[in-house]
Image (tube, rainbow, N blue to C red):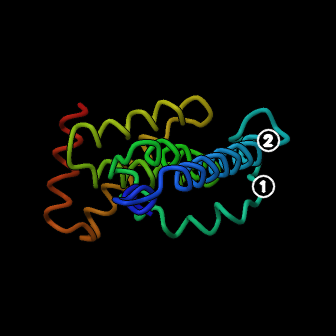
Amino acid sequence: APATVIAGPGAGPGLHEGVREGCERLLQLLLLHLQKLVHGRSSPSLAESPPRPVPFLEALRPHVRELCLDTLRMERKRCLWQHQLLSLLSVHSAPHGAAEVLFFLLALARTPEELSLAPQLHAGLRAVLPDPLPAAVTAAVAQIHAGRLPQAQLAQLLHNLALLL
């Protein structure tokens, strides 16, 4: 829910502060547990060992575009949690998942601040995966050739790529 729902006008500070702190703690624990599941593979290299099924992440895979859009809203702590979730989802569903997330961040970002999330994610992914950027560019080109990008989104993608170069 948007931050205004959690701490909207007239909200009692004591109750809502406790609820907010409890929710923050639950999210942190969930992300920590997901991190252990994603990075706790038998092989030292993530590329060499198949991912363990993580039903929560598997259920999120069809919603990558919506997760990226929501992350790009840049709502304080929520953005940090979503960025971490996108990173875990990228690693879990690599190599295609990482390319898909990077593609959506590049295609949907409308401001330099939003666009900065893509290189941040890329840097984190490069530490544990082979470079996902070529696959993201390949995915972008495939989307363009298939005519799946609306004109405005295509223009935004090309603008964002030019800014990053």
Frontmost residue, 82 versus 40: 82
Residue 126 visible here:
yes
Q: Position of residue 76 (x, y in %)?
A: 40, 43
Tag 1 near tag 2, CB within 8 Å: yes
Which corner quadrant of the image does residue 149 belong to?
bottom left
- Tell me the SS state at disc 1: loop
Residue bearing mark 1: 52
State the mark number for residue 40.
2
Up-down: is 132 above or below 152?
above
Measured as percent of width and height from the top left, residue 105 is found at: 35, 50
Please state which amino acid type lies under the numbered disc 2.
Gly
Direction from residue 98 to residue 50 in the image, left or right:
right
One can see residue 70 in this view: no
Q: Residue at x 58, y 52 (%)?
A: 89
The quarter in which the C terminus is drawn is: top left
Identity of the residue drawn at 31% across and 63% down:
143
- Location of residue 42 in the rendering, given as x and y in whole percent from the top left corner: 85, 41
Look at the image and tell me in which quarter the N terminus lies. Answer: bottom left
The answer to which of 63 and 128 lies nearer the viewer is 63
13 with respect to 51 (left or right): left
